[in-house]
Image (spheres, rainbow, N blue to C red):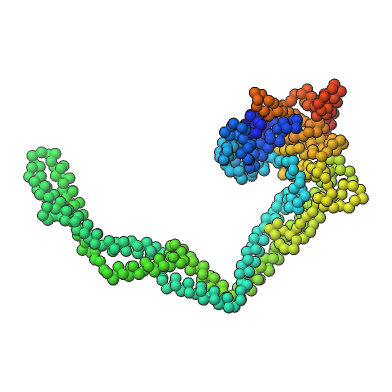
Amino acid sequence: MLVHLHVKNLALIQEAQADFGPGLNILTGETGAGKSILMGSVNLALGQKMSRGMIREGASYALVELVFQVDAPTEEKLKELEVFPEDGQVIITRRLMENRSISKVNGETTTAANIRKIASLLLDIHGQHEHQSLLYPEKQMEILDGFGGLEIQDKKEKVKELYREYSRLKKELEGYGIDEEQRRREMGFLEYEIREISQAQLRKGEDQELETAYRKLSNGKKITEGLGFVYQITGYEGEGMGAQMGRAIQKLSQIREYDSQLENIYSSMEDMDSLLNDLNRELSSYLSEFVFSEEEFQELEERLDLINHLKSKYGHTIEEILVYQKEKEEELEKLENFQSRKEELERKLSHQEVLLKTASRELTDSRKKWAAGLEKQIIQGLEDLNFLNVEFQIHFRQKEGYTAQGRDSVTFMISTNPGEPVLPLQQVVSGGELSRIMLAIKTLLADKDQTETLIFDEIDTGISGRTAQKVAEKMGVIGECHQVLCITHLPQIASQADYHYLIEKNVENMETTTRIRKLSYEESVEELARMLGGAKITQAVLENAAEMKDLAQQQKNTRLK
């Protein structure tokens, strides 16, 4: 349930806050007061794209914050998305700046895509123009599949997996659509590449070893000259460090008996002499073993040139070259066994098509079963919304080929007048009728997926009179099992409110601001009177408004009993 909304520096809103309750939360206000901006802020918080002009003039940023109180089942689903409610609360914030925005969930930064996944578990928004999507076959299929729940979802997943393999086999088989001459040309080229790599007899890590050896040999003169110099400096001949160390130890041995502390110094010098002696032997050994071979150096150069030539053609490393060789060997093997491989693929594709056809048929059967129930429930929902003698059917048509969604195409058919044939929605209904049909469907799906919060943004477009009263009663019924936030301009719907909020525009200090406030019973009656009477509100209009609100409450009490 959405319990708190906080908006700052967004369009006309300097700062606005509202606490919402369970049941039916109604938002009303004059045209242009900012109702759409306030509800649009919810969409912004949930990842909708924004324009720079949305940030209030003079402000450096805009902020939208939503606080949800979730039940235990929703909390478990959120944990699967790595969202862990604190005291049952989920706080979604989005800070909007000129060139970027930052979204957070419970204080942790996240992506807009992740926010949308989280939001799908928390609420369902029906915008002013969303009902138009009901005219598209894809949306109609989505509604049917949503109504079928897990049963259809499982079958769809099976079809999707089978279709993926079917498409892979089909694509691979398309690669066998070449003539004999082309096949021989490709085989000749593959054989050349494989032979060139194979003859090199490459070994993993060989290039690094060769480069190390090449670097050593190519710098042999520098190495021998440098080590010779070090050997001379540290040696035991002439004025080398070893010779001087020997004389120093000899001198120290003559005086060490005069002071016990000199024994430690003498011992340290002996250790140094031993280390220097070991170093000198290592240098001598390295120099005696290091021999520069022109022949070896040339072989190294040639081998490295060959490897670098292969790298320029087949990969940046020996590992990549060997992988390339394996791939080409597999391609060659396919071409060598072209006919048998093609026949094998055709058998596999044929078998996969049988599996896909069976799974698609099972999905169709399941959809048709659920379609029958959906037809009945939509008819009932439409009758509740003042569609009299309405007929509603879901027609199926099989597509030519296979898709990841099966082979079905569905069309919602309706007749709103007795004696008229059922026709596709787009050929029959008006905007107001379409809005009511979507309301009926939204109600069904919300019960199906247990969405706790529903938001309706001006769904009452194009309706009035008895129909408006029916829609109002429907909203009241929905509010008994869901939290509903509804922007409306109809007093019939507003009278059903469990909580009534007024969105109003004020001008202060030459600045226009929009704010939202919760209305008391008396204030709600006054707002209903404004909606009923327009500019001039008489006592009779006020009494009419109070009667309308009291009757709505009586209806609720009767339903609850």
**Who's the residue at 91% across and 48% down the image?**
418
Q: Position of residue 120 (x, y in %)?
A: 67, 43
Quarter placement of the C terminus: top right
Work out whether 518 lies above or below 36. above
Based on the displayed image, in which of its 4 quarters is residue 183 positioned? bottom right
Q: Give the farthest residue toward the front.
A: 510
**Who's the residue at 80% across and 44% down the image?**
431
Q: Position of residue 162 (x, y in %)?
A: 66, 61
| Residue 465 relative to residue 73: left or right | right
Quarter placement of the N terminus: top right
Q: Is residue 22 visible?
A: no
Could you say which is closer to the camera, residue 202 or residue 74? Answer: 202
| Residue 369 relative to residue 249: left or right | right
Q: Position of residue 182 (x, y in %)?
A: 58, 75
| Residue 60 relative to residue 248: left or right | right
Q: Is residue 426 visible?
A: yes
Work out whether 138 lies above or below 332. above
